[in-house]
Image (tube, rainbow, N blue to C red):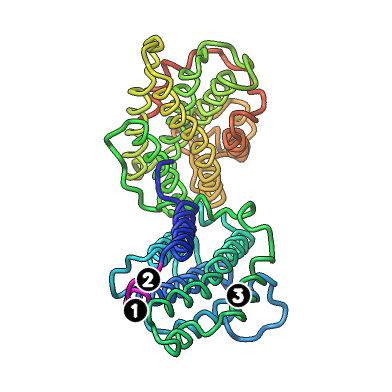
Amino acid sequence: MGMTTYAELLAQATAHLREGSTTLRGDRFWTPDEALDAIGDFHGLLDAIASHGRRLLRPAQLGRLGLTRHRDGLPPVERASIDLITRLEALTGDARPHPSQVRLGTTPWARSALALRAAADLVGTHFSTDGRPRSPDAAAATTASFDAGLVDLGHLAVAALAHEGPLALRAIQAGVPRTIVTRQLPGFEALADAARELSTQGAGRPETLLNSLGQTQLRVRTDDPAAELSDRMVRLRQGVWSLIADHADVLPSLRLTAGLGVAVHAHAAALHGGDLTAPDGAGPTGPGALVAHGRAWQRLHHALSQFAVLAPPAASVRADAVAAARLLSELVPLDAPRDRARTATVDRHVGAALNGAVQVMADIAVHEGAAFDRLSRAGLLHIPARALPRDLVTDHPDVAAARLNGRTVPAPNEILRAVATMYAEVAAHPIGVPAPRPSDHRALRSQVEPLSIS
């Protein structure tokens, strides 16, 4: 979605490590100081690996005691990780910041360490100090996710430690006394064995959910509408996720984003040539599925509009939802023919942004469903008695009296269950959405603008 991710930072760390390997094979150090700087930065990289491992261990160990204390039954990945980390820390020392961080490092080892520390800090923004999630991505991460990340770190450590011998040789060639080189690079066979042990504990990268972690506080890019839409949608997902634990009346925010769900799917369908006036069931995949999914969001928005609200939408949610609706209209107007002059590159750029918005709306639906469930269980959802169907009123005498007096009543279980079912429907990606219930076949076009900002 146009932001720096955990996977990208690890890729940078690996690329710089590869650069360091190439430099050692093809060039020499010209002075002893240059060689000693490289050795110091190499130690800094090993320290960054240890710090990164601690960062990944912390959320996975929530509720466990200590890191170095012996405990029976530790998972193999955790046991191997602790062994490697404690060995690395014994080598690099406990000075904080590490001496390599005090000066401006210019070697590939320093750049690799910087990227690795940035990746650790990125993970840290998603979790509190006691390991609690602070973002929807963090909430989805499991112990298996961190185990896979630790296995990846083991592979990186194996690659880094393999450079000890060549680095020592180049330092001696540059005139660094052998005693100093031996003291700084004493032979890392035990460390390499510990790294290999960790790297063989699992498949690693294919299993991890950490790769997609991005910035939790995203600065919105406003120089490109498609990029801005992507950034707004990511921030909106974060904002909606926070509603799950919000003790205020969040129903207006849920209703607002349901309206945006209608708009996202209508504009995405229009981009792909969909007919917004087509009857339901016009296509189980492609534009037809987007139209059907937009109508499912429309039914949800209508259902949420029945409930009485006590407050306006959350300011952050409203700002991003309104901006996203505006951007959708700019990128793919519903009342204008398709612009044939657009280049294929622009279409792909806009299409990627809208396809991403569709996926984000599915994520938002999951978090909204959880927030709605909280409101439902807490008995915070009320509905004007006059808005209830007659069959429900006749089954509940107290509701009938409230209807005559114009009062609100707690939402009946039948209404709450129906809305929960709608959330389950919109939480599925349109490609796999079930056939929607029959409707009046009205076009989405007239509904999109008012729903997206109400």
Residue 294 vertical placement versus 75 (above, below): above
Q: Which residue is mark 1?
A: 32
Disc 3: CA contacts within 10 A as few (<14), some (14-19) or many (>=20): some
Q: Quadrant of residue 71?
A: bottom right
Q: Which residue is mark 3?
A: 192
Q: Is residue 32 magenta?
A: yes
Q: Which residue is mark 2?
A: 29
Q: Quadrant of the C terminus?
A: top left
Residue type at mark 1: give it: Pro
Q: Residue 392: give x, y in percent of width and height.
A: 61, 31
For marks 1 and 3, give the CA distance: 26 Å
Dot in front, 1 or 3? 1
Residue at 40 percent of width and 42 percent of height: 2
Question: Mark 2 or mark 3, which is nearer the start of the sequence?
Answer: 2
Residue 38 in view, yes or no: yes
Residue type at mark 2: give it: Phe
Q: Magenta segment, which residues?
A: 28-36
Residue type at mark 3: give it: Ala
Question: Mark 3 or mark 1, which is nearer the start of the sequence?
Answer: 1
Q: Quadrant of residue 179?
A: bottom left
Q: Quadrant of the N terminus?
A: top left
Q: Residue 83: give x, y in percent of width and height.
A: 61, 79
